[in-house]
């Protein structure tokens, strides 16, 4: 991997793309430290030193690189865009128009991208309103008595919502710039930047508490899990496909053999994100209730990262969403119809319904393995908290974090290698 980066920097065109990508990532991180208007940054830092947050805000704060709890101009991070993209993808099942746009090719994809942008800005305004309301009410940092708002007027409230929504739009633009002019997928790299930026400081805070043994254990576990993730993410089940020979005029078409690559983890990191978001909502709702209420105390006791009730629900939801999202993104009937239309067939199975049934059987088997793999990866960080005697806020990575970091790293290195091969490709006559 390091050799690929070194070779890319020696290629002028790739060096320019890499430097542009690093420049955008640096601006993104800089914006995470610029406070929104009306926020007392000194008071925020004091509250961050006191508070140990464990709620839905943790997930949003993870994808914003710690910018959310600092109430910066990029406080919402990339989370509104992720949510909007998932919603638009799920709406393909409900709204036939969206499915038709998906099948139209580049024109339809451009229209879906436009819808995603509009929905991102709407969700950004909604999340900004909720975040600022929590900050004004003091529920963002319940253990801190400092007032983090320097101006608590309604006018400043509106200005903060507009600034955070505009920050979401700028982050979305940054991601598209990286995709067009840089290396790799822009949105994925911004998420990678946000997550990786928090790890050194969290590891240092653990070490300063005389727990350097825990730091070494975390690093070793990170390397072992990363190796396992790389192994599984690159694994494929290749289903052979043959195409019949056809004569059109005097020319012969078809007669080739190819395969359908089916990944073991076809759903990616989406099931873990969904499960984490749903399980974080009760703790978020409990913040609006009275602390002495019975239901608030029950949620506070059971919805923690070390409680077996929470971990069991986490595993079951991850399994459910792995199968659910795979069923949405891969349609065996559609694949079988496309193969039949172009004269393709799987050896030993007739075209049409038998082929679709075989694909459904295979996808269910490999999704079972992929779902169990996701459950193990998602639960490892939570299970490590218990023997290492750490709080949930101290763990520098989670199951979502591991999958994103390794996945984005693999994707970026593959794209660099692809572009290097294109630059150093020797002509046929040479």
Image (spheres, rainbow, N blue to C red):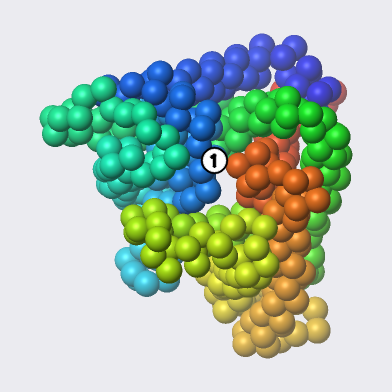
Q: How many labels does the image show?
A: 1
Q: Residue placed farthest to the front in the image?
A: 292
Is residue 260 visible to the viewer in this orientation of the structure? no
Near-viewer residue (118 or 111): 118
Q: Where is residue 164 in the image (x, y as percent from the top left)?
A: 31, 32
Q: Is residue 149 above or below residue 249?
A: above
Q: Is residue 365 above or below residue 284?
A: below
Where on the picture, by quarter, is residue 6? top right
Where on the picture, by quarter, is residue 428? top right
Q: Quadrant of the image for the N terminus?
A: top right
Q: Is residue 70 left or right of residue 249?
A: left
Helix, strand or loop status at disc 1: loop
The residue labelled by disc 1 is: 52
Q: Is residue 21 left or right of residue 93?
A: right
Q: In this view, does 130 lie to the left or right of 410?
A: left
Is residue 220 visible to the viewer in this orientation of the structure? yes
Where on the picture, by quarter, is residue 258? bottom right
Q: Quadrant of the image for the C terminus?
A: top right
Q: Where is residue 305 in the image (x, y as percent from the top left)?
A: 63, 56
Residue drawn at point x = 20 percent, y = 33 percent? 157
């Amino acid at each position: 991997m390091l050799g690929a980066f070194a070779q890319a920097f020696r290629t002028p065109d790739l060096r320019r793309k890499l430097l542009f990508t690093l420049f955008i990532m640096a601006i993104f991180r800089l914006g995470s430290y610029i406070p929104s208007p009306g926020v007392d940054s000194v008071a925020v830092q004091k509250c961050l030193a006191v508070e140990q947050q464990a709620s839905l805000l943790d997930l949003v704060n993870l994808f914003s690189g710690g910018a959310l709890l600092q109430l910066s101009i990029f406080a919402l991070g990339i989370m509104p865009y992720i949510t909007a993209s998932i919603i638009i993808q799920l709406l393909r099942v409900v709204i036939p128009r969206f499915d038709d746009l998906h099948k139209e090719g580049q024109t339809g994809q451009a229209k879906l991208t436009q819808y995603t942008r509009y929905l991102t800005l709407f969700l950004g305004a909604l999340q900004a309103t909720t975040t600022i309301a929590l900050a004004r009410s003091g529920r963002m940092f319940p253990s801190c008595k400092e007032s983090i708002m320097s101006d608590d007027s309604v006018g400043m409230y509106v200005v903060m919502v507009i600034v955070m929504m505009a920050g979401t739009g700028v982050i979305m633009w940054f991601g598209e710039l990286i995709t067009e002019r840089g290396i790799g997928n822009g949105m994925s790299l911004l998420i990678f930047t946000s997550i990786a930026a928090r790890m050194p400081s969290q590891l240092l805070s653990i070490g300063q508490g005389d727990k350097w043994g825990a730091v070494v254990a975390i690093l070793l576990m990170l390397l072992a899990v990363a190796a396992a993730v790389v192994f599984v993410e690159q694994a494929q089940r290749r289903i052979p496909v043959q195409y019949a020979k056809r004569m059109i005029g005097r020319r012969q078409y078809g007669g080739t053999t190819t395969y359908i690559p089916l990944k073991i983890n076809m759903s990616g990191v989406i099931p873990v994100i969904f499960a984490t978001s749903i399980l974080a909502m009760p703790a978020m709702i409990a913040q609006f209730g009275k602390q002495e209420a019975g239901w608030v105390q029950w949620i506070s006791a059971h919805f923690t990262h070390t409680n077996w009730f929470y971990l069991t629900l986490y595993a079951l939801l991850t399994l459910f969403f792995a199968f659910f999202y795979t069923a949405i993104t891969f349609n065996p009937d559609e694949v079988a119809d496309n193969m039949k239309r172009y004269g393709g067939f799987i050896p030993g199975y007739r075209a049409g319904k038998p082929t679709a049934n075989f694909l459904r059987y295979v996808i269910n088997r490999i999704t079972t393995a992929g779902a169990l793999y996701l459950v193990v990866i998602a639960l490892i960080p939570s299970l490590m908290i218990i023997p290492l005697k750490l709080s949930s806020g101290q763990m520098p990575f989670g199951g979502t974090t591991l999958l994103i970091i390794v996945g984005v790293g693999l994707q970026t290195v593959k794209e660099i290698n692809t572009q290097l091969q294109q630059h150093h490709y020797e002509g046929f006559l040479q």
